[in-house]
Each structure stands twice: as C-alpha cells, then as structure tokens.
Amino acid sequence: MDHTPPPPPDPHQPQRHQSQRHQPSQRHQPQRPQPPIPSTEAAVGVLSALAERRGLPVAVEHAIGADESSRRTAAGAFAVTDEDGSLPHEALLEIPATDGPDGAPFTPRIAVQLFEEGDAHITLDGVTFHDLPREATPAFLEAVFDRRAHLRTTWYPPFCRLVVTLDGELSYKEVVPMAYGGLSRWMSSLRS
C-alpha cells in the first residue's frame, strides 16, 4: 500500500471545498463577533467602564453566595456555596435616566441584572428584556446610548413594542405595557 501524500493542488484549477456549500450566508450573522465575558465580575467592569465613558453614573450591588442569589431559592439555611462547591455571583447595575442639554430625555432608567449562568435581564424604563447573553449586554447598552432603539406601534389593536437594534441584523424586542402609565418620557422621544 502506498502512503505517499496526495499531490499539492494546482493553483490554476478552481478549488471546491464541500464545507463552502453548507456555510450560512453572511447577512444572517452579526457583523462583529461579541467578545467573551467570562464572569459576572468581568461583565460589571465592562458595563461600568462603558457607562463612565459616556459620563453616566453607575450604582452596583453584588449578591455573592447561594444564600444571596435570586436563583438559588432551594439553598439550605446558612448555605453559601452551591452543591458543587462553587460560589455564585450575581450583580445589579443601575444607571439613572438623564436629560440632554436641551432638556429632552437622553437615556432611560437602566437596570442590568447579571446572573451566574451567563445571562442577563436589562430593564429600560420598566420594560424588561429577558435572558440576553452576557456577551450581548455591552452592545445592547451601546445601542441604547446611540439611540438605535425605536418603537413599533399599531393603532388597532393597540399595541406597542420596544425594539433595540444591535450591530448587523440582530435586534431585541419586548412588549411595552401600556396599562400602567403608558410611555415614559424617553420612549415618547423615540416616536419622533
């Protein structure tokens, strides 16, 4: 049996690779990959730096330990670690609403709840976007600060949805509860 390697490909012949046929098109992928954020503490650092670059104040609360974690309701009395010995860490970042120099709303009231499992909830003026990947939170806040958020409304039936568009074609949508006070000042400014 001959164990010689195959000859090198001819540079003048078109190359065909089977893997090229099964790749998804570029228009369905985000244009910029989101860098990994390995921990809750790393996410707090990235989001705090992002807000501080914009001149926005940030308040941070940490919940460390199974007895402090919101998702560890079955933790025994005085239990600090999970069953596997790990120490869960959650954080809540709050950024107050701000107005621009002309008195118009510039940013909404923002709350970012980061979970140990790698997901986050972001609340903009009472509208909560559930289960965002931790890696998407910086791009999400950048989109809000850059005013890449808008409202989709219908008159009949009355319906309102807040849409935040990240880079590429990725966007997050949540229903705005109109029954409890309607639109905030910031959301009303998105209509114009």
Image (cartoon, grey):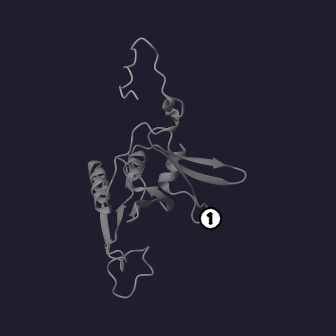
Location of residue 104 in the rendering, given as x and y in whole percent from the top left corner: 42, 49
Considering only vertical position in the picture, is 19 above or below 130? above
Considering only vertical position in the picture, is 61 above or below 108? below
Location of residue 127 in the rendering, given as x and y in whole percent from the top left corner: 51, 60
Instruction: Note whether residue 126 is visible.
Output: yes
Specify whether 59 is left or right of 132. Answer: left
Give the camera-side residue of 77 and 5: 5
Q: Residue drawn at (39%, 19%), measured in percent from left and top? A: 9
Specify whether 31 is left or right of 49. Answer: right
Q: Residue drawn at (40%, 14%), measured in percent from left and top? A: 10
Location of residue 50 in the rendering, given as x and y in whole percent from the top left corner: 30, 50
Looking at the rendered structure, the kind of residue marked 1 is Ala
Considering only vertical position in the picture, is 101 above or below 178? above
Of all residues shown, which one is farthest toward the front? 1
Give the camera-side residue of 155 and 127: 127
Instruction: Note whether residue 110 is visible.
Output: no
Q: Which residue is mark 1?
A: 179
